[in-house]
Amino acid sequence: MQYIDSDRVDLRSDTITQPTPGMREAMSEAIVGDDVLGDDPTVIELQNRLASMFNKEAALFVPSGTMSNAIAIKAQTSPGDEIITERNSHIYVYEGGGYAALSGCSIALVPSQNGIMNPVEVEKSIRKREGSLGHYPNGTLVCVENTSNRGGGTFYPQGNLDSICEVAKNSDCSSHLDGARIFNAAVASGTHLDRMVRDFDSVSVCLSKGLGAPVGSVLLSSSERIGAAHRWRKMFGGGMRQAGIIAAAGIYAIENHMDRLVEDHNHAKALAESIGRMPNFNVDMDSVSTNMVYVQSDEITSNDLLEGLSERGIDVLTIDESTIRLVTHLHITQGDVNRVIACFESLS
Ligand SMILES: Cc1ncc(COP(=O)(O)O)c(C=O)c1O
């Protein structure tokens, strides 16, 4: 789907995609209302469609994945509580410490294998006020990220998700799934979305990552929790008026861009296999499961690599001094993949 007027190959993130012509048409034709007053039919349709796809009672359209996670934390904790999540999770690393500033929570960090937490480690990380002579904070919310961004785009085995939810429930904690890339996880694992999230109390999904919508995330949960979330969205300033314009892009994305995610995964695998075979670069193939490739090098610093690739028309992001990240998405073609491999070869 090459229609972007640029000769650069942008692999910085799957968030850089531009609305396709079909998506723009759907947006321009959207029937809108005032969603703060609750009468935007396109927002209502998007929320209902997603609630039904995920088999949750209710849904709330919000501007971003960060706000969706923040509202989920706010709605399911009290100040002084602790949330439990993976060591390099987006909630911990990339959301400005919102769990602390907005919800007054501390955080317990769980170790992982390529971003995938083991239920036993989760259980060990849950601290409870009760029985601690008042020493511990109260762990009340377990957050899981699927796919795991910093884990390399890895997805959880279903048994693992089920066990983590069971651990949470047995410890009197709620469970939240940060499913910014849950559609990638579903396509790669072959697991139905509703089955994947069955035992989670809340789920955040992003329309603006692999699905290619310009903006928007949706929080899914029980009607009661979404009622509370609706109030927090108001207080966080996330109420949008004629939001049907962007909800229409989300509806178009779930209808047209879900099945094609397999192409992104194939492109990532092809990049990983070729780059990983080159002498100067290492790729952990175990982590390459969806649309991300982390490339490590002991010979070339990530800044030099970023610059060398940039001079050749390829854009990537650095993760640390020896690692860069490539993310495939709906603008990346097989031709782009071949070009990127050739550029790495010229730098190897
Ligand atoms: C795993 C994960 N969660 C949440 C987010 C936040 O999404 P947003 O950028 O829409 O705030 C991202 C963004 O990349 C992400 O990768």
Image (cartoon, rainbow, N blue to C red):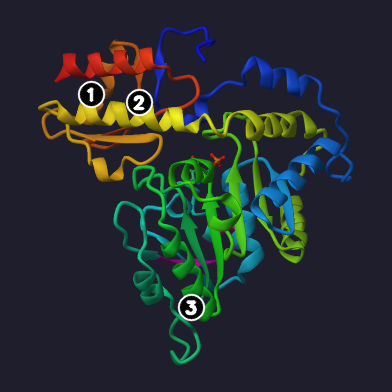
Residue 238 can be seen in this image = no
The spot of residue 281 in percent (x, y) is 16, 30
Q: Is residue 106 inside the magenta stretch?
A: yes
Q: Nearer the viewer, residue 195 or 71?
A: 195
The spot of residue 273 in percent (x, y) is 23, 30
The spot of residue 217 in percent (x, y) is 63, 42
Q: Nearer the viewer, residue 9 or 298?
A: 9
Residue 21 can be seen in this image = yes
The three-letter code of the residue at mark 2 reads: Val
Residue at image position (81%, 43%) is 44
Q: Secondary structure at mark 3?
A: loop
The spot of residue 65 in percent (x, y) is 58, 45
The three-letter code of the residue at mark 3 reads: Pro
In the image, which disc is placed on residue 137?
A: 3
User: Which label's residue is closer to the chain start, 1 or 2?
Assistant: 1
Badge 1, how many Cα within 10 Å: few under 14, some, many 20+?
many
**Residue that label 2 marks:** 316
The three-letter code of the residue at mark 1 reads: Leu
In front of the other: label 3 or label 1?
1
In the image, which disc is placed on residue 305?
A: 1
**Inter-mark Cα distance, 3 to 2:** 40 Å
Badge 3, how many Cα within 10 Å: few under 14, some, many 20+?
many
